[in-house]
Image (cartoon, rainbow, N blue to C red):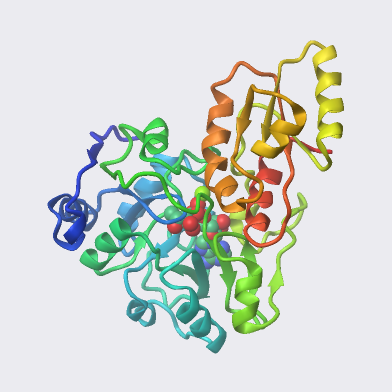
Amino acid sequence: MAYKRETKVWRTFNQDNLNEDEHILEAVQMLKEGKIVAFPTETVYGLGADATNNQAVEKIFQAKGRPSDNPLIAHIGSPNLINDYVTEVPEHAKKLIDAFWPGPLTVILKSNGRIANNVTAGLKTVGLRMPDEPHALAILRNVNRPIAAPSANRSGKPSPTTAEHVLQDLNGKIDGLVDGGKTGIGVESTVIDCTTEPPMILRPGGVTKEQIESVIGVVDQIDSEVKESEQPRSPGLKYKHYAPEKPIWLVRGDALKMKQIAEKLLNEGKRVQFLVSEERAEELQIIDSINLGSRKQLNEITANLYNALRKIDSLQVDIVVAESFTKEGIGQALMNRLERAATKII
Ligand code: TXA
Ligand code: MG
């Protein structure tokens, strides 16, 4: 059964002292009472619930329409909390935590069973992350317990990078929303399984493979193409996330190739929209495109992607023709999301 909730939105904060801000403390109180509250992180907005409270966590699955076999990340406000929830922290995990927390890195460790079992979806492991965003940290430090927080979107929609996106999907379905403005990174955290040797990246994200390898040496990486019959290592991988309602054709090639594809579609009477960098828009000599920013600033392109994917759904178009980017650095996470959003890669 879906509950109807009055969604309280907080937009103003005492930025000099977030830890004692009255709106933050109100959000904290709600979380302690088992309510669900969305808040910004440096990656995307998360939908939080007390990760030690099964009933509270159940509300997240209901509000999102999320399949219950897909585990949630538990967010903490200090690395000191880790040992209360896991059986051991291997050496490579310690190094990663030292190097990248607070930040966009989720480490998978062996759970000691104190995190609610619907957070871990019955797995023997738990994903932990300390985010690097002032509102999130103020909340987490005040609650002083892990907060389960998947991205604050309806399941199947792109993750939210603004409070407006959260309201589009979840207004009336969640108890509260902390509006901290647009998120900085714009794609989710990197998920790395530290229960294996070497560790394995399950989801590329805000911390790059290159950065990880500079700290702990070579790591494995899961093949992001999941075949139908396989049991995925990370349950989230089997779901086609980030998919807008309109078909997206992702083009591996230059402006000429994109132009030829678009012309063919136009001749078939299709309404076409481009999803491109400002450089590519110039090469194509088009004014009417969805502009992701400069190709020289992949961070900017990445930060704008989910907003662009949401915009596509509201446009009168039949097909979106999208540009491909390098898979180096943050480009790996960017391309992972674009490939998973695409209906066709050509
Ligand atoms: O940046 C982020 O990580 C955002 C913000 C809100 O922190 N959160 C987020 O959560 O993206 P979510 O639930 O949308 O994605 C969590 C991913 C899923 O792919 C899930 O399968 C994986 O992490 N995951 C969580 N716990 C896991 C576990 N124990 N073993 C394997 N994969 C796990
Ligand atoms: Mg998500």
Residue 334 coordinates in the image, percent (x, y): 64, 51
Asked whether the viewer can see residue 220, the reply is yes
* Residue depicted at x 25% and y 49%: 35
* Residue depicted at x 30% and y 44%: 179
Residue 256 coordinates in the image, percent (x, y): 86, 32
* 89 on left or right of 199: left
Residue 160 coordinates in the image, percent (x, y): 45, 42
* 294 on left or right of 53: right
In this rendering, the answer to whether 161 lies above or below 22 is above
* 155 on left or right of 54: right
* Residue depicted at x 25% and y 69%: 144
Residue 297 coordinates in the image, percent (x, y): 60, 51
* 20 on left or right of 129: left
**Quarter of the image with the N terminus in it:** top left
In this rendering, the answer to whether 117 lies above or below 342 is below
The answer to which image quadrant residue 197 occupies is: bottom right
Asked whether the viewer can see residue 71, the reply is no
**Quarter of the image with the C terminus in it:** top right
Residue, far top: 269
Residue, far bottom: 91
